[in-house]
Amino acid sequence: DLIGSWIFFFFPFSVYQSLTFGEWTLEYILALITGVTFQYAAISPMMKEKGIKVWLTALKIDFLSLTSWQIGMYGWMAIVIFGFLGRLSPTTPEFWFMMQIAMCCGFLTAYPVNWWLVKKGIKMGM
């Protein structure tokens, strides 16, 4: 979200005629690519298989976790953007303060999903 906000700041585009949805789309895709790459780096040394199977496993591990995190973040930011303050620029302290709250919301929505993924053996506990 840190990188995506700045990329979008300099190269904005809309999705469904909304800049907010354009920014969220970019940030979700970047977060998924980053998350899957980190998952791959973490699990590839432990797996016997190599190549595409490891990438698919990394995607399986990270997709639900990341999606649930983003739901919490976007949920809070939707309340802020559409209900209170309007669109915020990453150049303002208000944006970053609201992002801190959004990350807490992301944690709350991702925690049960990650707990379930660990319980099912899809994701390893730390």
Image: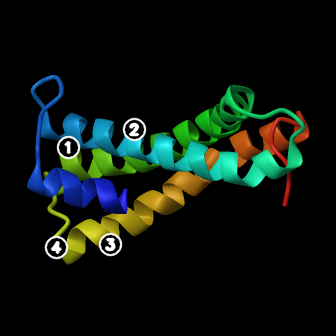
Figure quadrant of residue 12: top left
Q: Are marks 3 and 4 in contact (CB under 8 Å)?
A: no
Residue at image point 48% right, 60% down: 103
Number of the front mark, 4 or 1: 4
**Cα gap from disc 1 to disc 2, whole angstroms:** 22 Å
Mark identifier at residue 97? 3
Q: Are marks 4 and 1 in contact (CB under 8 Å)?
A: no
Q: Amino acid at mark 3?
A: Phe
Mark 3, Cα crowd under 10 Å, few <14 / some 14-19 / many 20+, is few
Q: Up-down: is 84 above or below 75?
A: below
**Cα gap from disc 2 to disc 3, whole angstroms:** 23 Å
The colour scheme used here is rainbow
Mark 1, Cα crowd under 10 Å, few <14 / some 14-19 / many 20+, is few
Residue at image point 16% right, 22% down: 16
Q: Amino acid at mark 1?
A: Phe
User: At numbered mark 2, what does the secondary structure look like: helix, strand or loop?
Assistant: helix
Instruction: Give whichever of discs 4 and 1 has the lower sequence position.
Output: 1
Residue at image point 25% right, 57% down: 5
Q: Up-down: is 54 above or below 96?
A: above
Q: Is residue 40 left or right of residue 22?
A: right
Number of the front mark, 3 or 1: 3
